[in-house]
Amino acid sequence: GLVPLGTGNDLARGAGLPLDPLAAAEGLTRWPTRPIDLLAGNDRVVVNVVHLGLGAHAAETASRWKARLGTLAYPLGAVVAGTWVSPWELRVTVDGRVVHEGTTVLAGVGNGRTIGGGTRMFPRAVLDDGIALTRTRGIIDYTDMLWLPEVLDLRPERFRWVMIDESQDLN
């Protein structure tokens, strides 16, 4: 079973578990077990989301404030990391087709919906459907690096520079 003890508890959130540790622990005796998909590659296993670029740097930056600020540390980490993270060139191939090639500030692969305490990186993700979602973001100006679409709860499909794709084979 899973008892959420972290700051963001994104895996528990995606599994529909209570975020309160006591409520989750009490439920362990009542709820049936269920499998979840694992993302595996390079001799590592991920159970929610792996991301690189701005997202990874934001999480690392936020770690110093999590004890004091809780989940508010994540958006603060994104803003601070956004002042120094540099874009890079990235090519993403999903099920044999190139879905992104170009300047990138954030990329991720996941089967969980959220990162950083509830930021919806993959709104359509399901933990046990056998599908991994990929997301890449190119930048068009500095404000893109502030994650404004997620913070303001805007739909990523409305922005041509945010791409989300489904896959079973990712390179």
Image (tube, grey):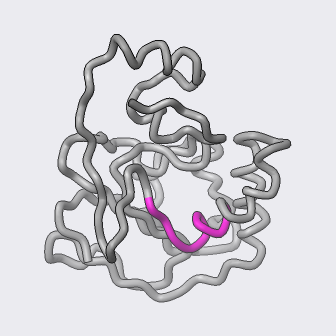
Which of 7/99 is in front? 7
Residue under the point 80% across and 44% down: 67
Report how many numbered discs are placed on residues in the image: 0
In the displayed structure, would residue 66 be above or below residue 136? Answer: above
In the displayed structure, would residue 170 be above or below residue 128? Answer: below
- Looking at the image, can residue 158 be seen? yes
* Residue 22 position within the rendered picture, expressed as x and y whole percent measured from the top left: 58, 17
Q: Quadrant of the C terminus?
A: bottom left
Quick check: is 75 in the magenta stretch?
no
Residue under the point 29% across and 64% down: 40
Quarter residue 85 falls in: bottom right
Quarter residue 2 falls in: top left
Residue under the point 70% across and 60% down: 78
* Residue 161 position within the rendered picture, expressed as x and y whole percent measured from the top left: 47, 67
Which of 134/163 is in front? 134
Start and end of the magenta stretch?
Answer: 50-58
Residue with the most extreme bottom position: 89
Which of 8/84 is in front? 8
In the displayed structure, would residue 145 be above or below residue 153? Answer: below
* Residue 97 position within the rendered picture, expressed as x and y whole percent measured from the top left: 18, 76
